[in-house]
Amino acid sequence: MVSTKPSVVPLPYWVRGDTNAFFGFGVNVLVNVLTLTGLCLFVVNLPEREVFGTILPALGIALVAGNIYYTHLARRLARRENRTDVTALPYGPSVPHMFIVIFVIMLPIYLSTGDAVRAWQAGMAWAFIIGVIVLIGAFVGPYIRRYTPRAALLGTLAGISITFISMNPAGQMWRMAWIALPVLALLLIGLLTDVKLPFNFPIGLAALLLGTAIGWIGGAMSVPDVTAAARDIAFAFPTFQLDLLWSGLSDMAPLLATAIPLGVYNFTEAMTNVESAATAGDNYNLRSVLLADGAGAVIGSALGSPFPPAVYVGHPGWKAAGGRTGYSMATGIVIALLCFLGMFSLLGAIFPTAAIVPILLYIGLLIGAQAFQATPRAHAAAVVAALIPNIAAWATGQMNNALAAAGTTAAEVGNEALAGAGVVYDGLRILGEGAILAGLVLGAIVAFIIDKRFVHAAVFAASGAVLAFIGLIHGEEVQWNANGQVALGYLFVAVICGIFALGKYPPRVPDPEEIELDRLHGASTPAAPAAAAPAATDSAAGDSTATDSAAAGGAAGGEKREPAVSS
């Protein structure tokens, strides 16, 4: 009798394409870890023993566990579908979150108290809250994504990318432009075009090596610094820091204003990335991904890391580069070993900062551009509205830092004196409080008004009134009647939108290009809100996501480009 059972295709742990994907993705994660190391040491002034002995080893545990887990998911999917071309999801420290936790959470506490450890405790607590919210998002995320306009979600992210991700690296770049600009040019050519280097050499590694060579030849780096850093290499393995975490959680209320919307963003972005992978042919279980991301943030914070990890943008690009199941696990293991051995001090002495930060500017450019490319053109004003609170938050932070450097504060200078110098400090401060959630609210209101969906706009305006009243937006802290005048303003907007809703105006009719864009992103159009269900639906038992989001895959890096972007 001839067997009709299909033969099982051998599934290797490593293929040639994994090598290319490993160098590209590995350099991406390496750059991100080098950046967050510098932020801890030179922005918050944390002691080196805490950074290299606790924070980085804790991050290493989260990265190696997460990447091994996603390798397991990829191999399980490959066996289930009897394929050898399944690509693991990329996973690493989230770039937007590492800037937000440093500049929005940790730095203000350090500047007001002078206590770097207290700032670190708050960062750990913030990362823990992010993780809990992502775990909850595994069950409620699809509903939030269904009812919030894409322009509001992406516009808020663009605000973060333009300010906290792009502006500071840009300032560092132009201090040593002779190193940074050639690196940026190489990144732009390799990542925004279909031009490939000879032998398909990873563009991220090539850019880093180019900047490093220019820096060393030009005398920007120092051999004694490398020698001194090499002496600091020592093995460190993390232990639980529950006492520090509990101390941070004891003053949790001020952290919620950023943790809640960023947690919402985390699971929303994870849904988009899962859709992107499905477009490339790999249908992962959304709930499995969100539970892993949330658990990674919770475990990492308990070990001492304030940096939540996340699935990265760019799965289709690594798939096109030939990556399969091995590259992700290899990246996690190598980066974890570097963290355990304290190698990032040595790497920081070898690689010039100006050779590293251009990739962050590129990330900011890409995320900012996506906010306009992946939303209807009619919603461009909504994207800008979502940008504004984040710009205000960044500008206020710059003012506060400048005043602190001068040995004073805005309160000591006085609002009248600042206004007399043309500085609208007080208004920008109020606008920027809880900027991420405020951007979501403002962007949604504007998008729904543009679509003449006045009931939806009124609901978001009323929500803004409640959020402002309790201080989650436009308030210095979470409390009752945190900012009544702003809450009243949102309430008036809700009333106005409610009055116009009585006119029963027909919703704006989307053009064909917009309908196609919404279809590709799995979203419903304004004219037909029930036309499409949430793009990502999953069952707890299987790896499946119902989606048709080719555009999401393109936004994630494209199948003809080698991405070096993180989410």
Image: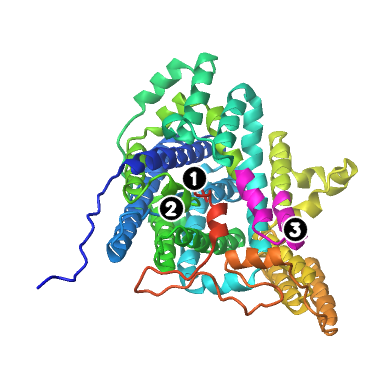
Indicate the position of residue 543 as horizontal and vertical percent values: 37, 68
Residue found farthest to the left: 1
Q: Tell which circle, 1 or 2, labels the residue nearer the N-terminal end.
A: 1
Judged by its main secondary structure, the magenta piece is helix
Q: Which mark is residue 261?
A: none
Cα distance, mark 1 to mark 2? 9 Å
* Residue 478, image quadrant: bottom right
The residue located at (73%, 47%) in the rendering is 396
* Residue 395, image quadrant: top right
* Residue 44 visible here: no
Q: Tell which circle, 3 or 1, labels the residue nearer the N-terminal end.
A: 1
Q: Which residue is mark 1?
A: 117
Bounds of the magenta segment: 364-391
Q: Which residue is mark 3?
A: 380
Q: Tell which circle, 2 or 3, labels the residue nearer the N-terminal end.
A: 2
The mark lying in front, picked from 2 and 3, is: 3
Q: Are marks 3 and 1 in contact (CB under 8 Å)?
A: no
For the N terminus, the image quarter is bottom left
Magenta segment: does it hold 379? yes
Which amino acid does the dot numbered 2 rest on?
Leu
Badge 2, how many Cα within 10 Å: few under 14, some, many 20+?
Answer: many
Indicate the position of residue 531 as horizontal and vertical percent values: 62, 78
Residue found farthest to the right: 420
Describe residue 119's horizontal placement relative to residue 29 as left or right: right
Magenta segment: does it hold 437? no
Which amino acid does the dot numbered 1 rest on?
Val
Q: Are marks 1 and 2 in contact (CB under 8 Å)?
A: yes
Q: Which residue is mark 2?
A: 244
The residue located at (76%, 62%) in the rendering is 378
Badge 1, how many Cα within 10 Å: few under 14, some, many 20+?
Answer: some
